[in-house]
Image (tube, grey):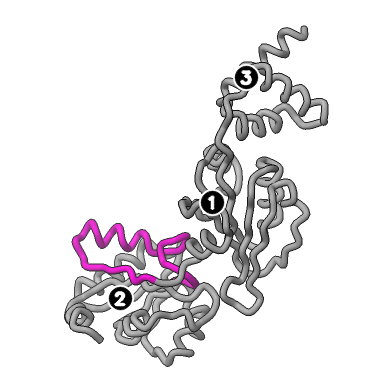
Amino acid sequence: MGDDYAEKKSTGMLYLVPTPIGNRRDMTLRALDVLRTADVIACEDTRHSSPLLESYAIHRPLLSYHQHNEQERSEELLFRVEQGERVAVISDAGMPGVSDPGGVLVRKAISRGLPYTVLPGASAVPVAAVASGIGDGRFAFFGFLPRKGKEREEVLSLLDSFPLAAICYESPYRIRQTLAELGQRWPERSFAVLREWSKQYEEVLHFTGHAGKDLALTEKGEFAFVIGPAAAPSAWTDEEVIRTLREKQEQGISAKQAMKEIVATSGRSRNEVYQLREEDRSAEK
């Protein structure tokens, strides 16, 4: 170990340590050094992390640190740092603080002026960005989409015209429903879904939105999926918007869904499309 690491060992320090998203051999040497010398390791689930730690002969005191005790446990962990201890935080997989507990600790450490560091390492986000082959290398991470209601619609409305690849997580229990819904909303956009990455049965599936409802998926393990950038909007004329609205309604598509699809591809705002629809309805009376 280098001099910088030895110096940090002499004082309290909070370490956020990424763990493999699949293959256990993806641990870094520095991560192993930190975990082996930590005074305590805070785990999202001690039962889940114990086999990983055991495989590297790491025998340190463990504490649970998850979304249900994050606020109170963070106080205990930061108190330990104040007392000169080295506290390591790991999640079940990937980077703590990325759709996993950890962000609260960092914010509190910053507000109190306590030392902390984040080790580089495994995360499903950049893996999905590269493995999907979607976009130009620029992307945004949206985590788990809100499940329903106003919050979900606000995020999806943002994505209607989002110019970058969008990376999201989803559980195996909702992945089929989510991809079917998004595929219906954006039938012409590119998608990719990744599962079990770095494990024996890793897979990535590429498809356009309209095929999302028929996708063959093994519903095991956490999923990451990528939504391709929205096409650069062309400025549809009023006549093109009205004609497309009529065509979609003749096809049996609801007015609400038709407007969503047109907003996503026309370069016209939701209010503009709605106003044109109302004017067309009035003219027909």
Question: Residue 97 in the image: x percent, y percent?
Answer: 41, 62
Q: Residue at x 48, y 51 (%)?
A: 139
Q: Are marks 2 and 1 in contact (CB under 8 Å)?
A: no
- Tell me the quarter of the image containing the N terminus: bottom left
In the image, which is nearer the foreground, mark 3 or mark 2? 3
Distance (Cα) linking label 2 and label 1: 38 Å
Crowding around mark 3 (Cα neighbors within 10 Å: few <14, some 14 to 19, many 20+) is: few
Q: Earlier in the sequence, mark 2 or mark 1?
A: 2
Residues tagged 3 and 1 counted as in contact (Cβ below 8 A): no
Q: Quadrant of the C terminus?
A: top right
In front of the other: 76 or 113: 113
The amino acid at mark 1 is: Gly
Dot label at residue 237:
3
Give the residue at x 53% y 42%.
155
Q: Quadrant of residue 205?
A: bottom right
Instruction: Tell me which residue sits at (30%, 86%) in the image.
Output: 37
- The numbered disc on residue 135 is 1
Q: Which residue is mark 2?
A: 87
Foreground residue among 133 and 52: 133
Crowd band around label 2 with a 10 angstrom C-alpha radius: few (<14), some (14–19), many (20+)? many
Residue 148 screen position, x and y as percent:
61, 45
Is 118 included in the stretch rendered in magenta?
yes
Q: Which residues are magenta?
A: 91-120
Q: Secondary structure at mark 1?
A: loop
User: Residue 134: where, in percent of width, then height?
Assistant: 57, 54
Q: Is residue 78 above or below residue 28?
A: above
- Residue 82's label in the rendered image is none
